Image (spheres, grey):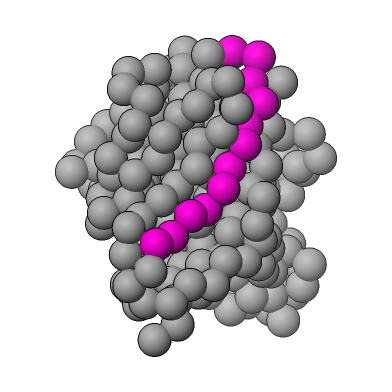
């Protein structure tokens, strides 16, 4: 149980285009979803927290207009990287918790974004 | 404030020998502590979790960790390493109330030599 999927697993795009990444909880309802970014050989950095039906809370230094997060249902959150640039290339990982305030998060397999 | 320090960025062991990955934490709250494993280009898998119950926590794949409040440590161990254990391991702290985000350590890369 508690499986989280991400799509696509890998995406290559041209500079200036926008890319959407989906995060789905497959066998549970996720009241809260999280988006992380991981640079090569580094740890995960929390970008934002989203609760279903409300606006995402972004961490300091993360541009909300650059990284658009939509949590439209209890099983789906999307991250859109707008006007992507090469410095946005990274590994993006989502996670989900079963209930708000739960300290256990279930992680997706990640999406490798490469911006040319 | 919460923080995690993983004392070794890289640990190398021979197959069949014990594994020790060290983690110290700092937390203003009663902490929840986790170990996650990440294989190359994969997401994170939860190995084990401590939430103020038994101080010795058993996880998957033969891993276990002991919570030592006096030492503010939560070291990960395994009696006998397998080749498949080679991966990146993250120690993570959160508040047991669940109202704070996860804080990740920088990770320890475990290499297993045949």
Residue sitting farthest toward the front: B17
Q: Could you tell me if residue B39 is visible in this image?
A: yes
| Vertical comparison of B61 with B110: above or below | above
Please report the residue visible at 58 percent of the width from the left and 59 percent of the height from the top. Answer: B108
Task: Find residue B52 and report its horizontal and vertical position in percent.
Answer: 39, 17
Q: Position of residue A43 (x, y in %)?
A: 64, 54
Depth check, front residue: B56 or A89: B56
Whether residue B111 sits left or right of residue A65 in the image: it is left
Furthest-bottom residue in view?
Answer: B114
Residue occupying the point 31% across, 22% down: B54
Residue at the image position 54 percent from the left and 72 percent from the top: B12
Which residue lies at the image location 40% right of the left edge and 40% below the top edge?
Answer: B65
Q: Is residue A41 above or below residue A100?
A: below
Is residue B23 located in the magenta-colored stretch of the structure?
yes
Front one among A106 and B93:
B93
Q: Main secondary structure of the magenta part?
A: strand
How far across and how far down the image is residue B94, in percent? 54, 27
Q: Nearer the viewer, residue B92 or B74?
A: B74
**Residue A13 location, x and y as percent?**
62, 77
Q: Nearer the viewer, residue A30 or B92?
A: B92
Range of the magenta residues?
Answer: B18-29
Compared to residue A43, the image places residue B65 above or below, namely above
């Amino acid at each position: 149980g508690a499986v989280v999927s991400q799509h696509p697993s890998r995406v290559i795009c041209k500079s200036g285009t926008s890319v959407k990444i989906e995060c789905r909880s497959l066998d549970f309802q996720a009241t809260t979803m999280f988006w992380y970014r991981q640079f090569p050989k580094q740890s995960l950095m929390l970008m934002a927290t989203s609760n279903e039906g409300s606006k995402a809370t972004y961490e300091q230094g993360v541009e909300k207009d650059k990284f658009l997060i939509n949590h439209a249902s209890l099983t789906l959150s999307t991250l859109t990287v707008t006007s992507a640039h090469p410095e946005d290339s990274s590994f993006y990982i989502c996670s989900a918790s079963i209930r708000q305030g739960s300290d256990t998060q279930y992680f997706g397999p990640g999406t490798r974004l490469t911006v040319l | 404030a919460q923080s995690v320090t993983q004392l070794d960025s890289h640990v190398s062991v021979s197959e069949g020998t014990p594994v020790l990955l060290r983690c110290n934490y700092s937390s203003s709250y009663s902490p929840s502590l986790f170990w996650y494993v990440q294989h190359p280009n994969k997401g994170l898998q939860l190995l084990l979790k401590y939430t103020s119950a038994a101080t010795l926590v058993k996880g998957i794949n033969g891993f276990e960790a002991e919570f030592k409040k006096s030492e503010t440590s939560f070291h990960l161990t395994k009696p006998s390493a397998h080749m498949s254990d080679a991966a990146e391991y993250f120690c993570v702290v959160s508040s047991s109330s669940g109202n704070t985000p996860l804080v990740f350590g920088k990770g320890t890369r475990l290499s297993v030599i045949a």
